Image (cartoon, grey):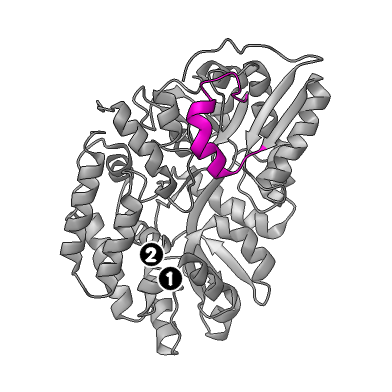
Amino acid sequence: MAHSFTRKTRTRLLGAAVAVTVGALALAGCSGGSGDAGGGDGDTLKLWHYEGADSAMGKAWAEAIKVFEEETGATVEFEEKSFEQIQKTASQVLDTDAAPDLMEFNKGNATAGFLASTGLITDISDAVDEYGWADKLAPSLQTTAKYSEDGVMGGDTWYGVPNYGEFVGAYYNLDAFEAAGLEVPTTYEEFVAVLDAFVAKGITPLSEAAAEYPLGQLWYQLALSQADRQFVDDYQLYENPVDWQGDEITYATETLQDYVDKGYIASDVSSIKADDAGVAFINGSAPIFVSGSWWFGRFVAEATGFDWSLQAFPESELSLGSSGNLWVVPENASNKELAYEFIDITMRPEIQAIIGNSGGLPVAANPADITDEKSAELISTFNGILDNDGLSFYPDWPAPGFYDVLVQELQGLVTGVQDAETTNAKLGEAYDEGTEEFR
């Protein structure tokens, strides 16, 4: 498939990348540099990333730095950059001698794809083959690491490597279920029966937010429950036109309206933000929260008054989610071989285990190394999704600014301003306009 990208389009994509998704941030960065120095005494690896020191990835990568320095004799010059710093300056810095050798960068067409299409980051396909990284990454994780010459993900060329992942599922307050005499659902029919049972007890079962991303992610999950991989490839990769009045999207929009009408979702959902929805689950106000694994660590720390679990959305082979951010090697990097060595260390089981035991989702961990029971459950759920090639990305990814459109139009739906057919038509118009230059 051909995609007509102009430099103006790429610049617009980069500027819009911040809105790609709350579960997905954005960054940016052109020309050649030899950058092939290997390891050895006196060499320095210049590393940038924006993970906090106490995060799962921050802890794992700190250990990777120690291992790297011990094994190579090289020194790591680490600079913790904020997301905003990299987003604003990367496209200029990466085209100079000040470029790092390795940095964390966000996946997606408007971010890593932009850098790939403009020559700012290195084609690392040979390193992927040399180190065998592809063997450790499920197909849906590889999609966000490989780009076409026009910067569209799912291409043939490797421009990055992820070493962690994320997905959206259903968080269940197990104590609330037990008090209501209910079991955690394993089918969608059981899921709806649980929603009805809580409503009958005067409880609004779903903690939701329509002022920000959660409601849009629930909407997309409902569509995915009726979809196959071709639908995802059409929606996300522009393989074929998306039918915005088709079965998948019509089901999602009509079902979401039904959820509001039946009291599964609060009537004031249009004014609720993501953090409000998460806090409502933390304080036990709502027994179910459909959202991402990025909440997991916070819930471990704060949702301590009851037992809870995170499961894949019931009876759906496809789930929202993707790889985490990517390790990318700037084209102007001075020490590319050192960068590859460091990436390889972060893919080792012992480093992956640190991610897993700290509440993250490693992509290549040895299950026996995950000693935290709750983390093991999380990783098992994620691995089940990977085994089914189920990761299906996020609803706002395909077009710049589509996040805001989703929020606005779904608010119109749940407040009764417009019906499902009108909502779909407006979403489709914005989607088609936003993806026209990609198709």
Q: How many numbered discs, if any? A: 2
Label 2 amino acid? Leu
Location of residue 114 by image quarter: top left
Q: Find the distance from the CA under tag 2 to the CA under tag 1.
A: 6 Å
Magenta residues? 80-100
Q: How crowded is mark 2: few (under 14 residues within 10 Å), some or many (20 or more)?
A: many
Residue that badge 2 annotates: 215
Q: Residue at x 50, y 13 (%)?
A: 32
The image position of residue 308, as x and y in percent, is 60, 70
Label 1 amino acid? Glu
Q: Residue at x 45, y 45 (%)?
A: 388
- Left or right, 289 with reference to 315: right
Residue 82: in magenta span: yes
Q: Answer yes or no: do the residues labelled 2 and 1 have beta carbons within 8 Å?
A: yes
In terms of secondary structure, where does tag 2 sit? helix
In terms of secondary structure, where does tag 1 sit? loop
384, 356: nearer the viewer? 356
- Left or right, 254 with reference to 151: left
- Left or right, 5 with reference to 186: left
* The N terminus, quarter of image: top left
| Above or below 209: residue 84 | above
Q: Which residue is drawn at 54% across and 40% down?
A: 325
Residue 214: in magenta span: no
| Above or below 282: residue 436 | above
Q: Residue 164 — which label?
A: none
Location of residue 225 by image quarter: bottom left
402, 365: nearer the viewer? 402
Q: Which residue is drawn at 73% across and 56% down?
A: 372
Q: Residue 208 — which label?
A: 1
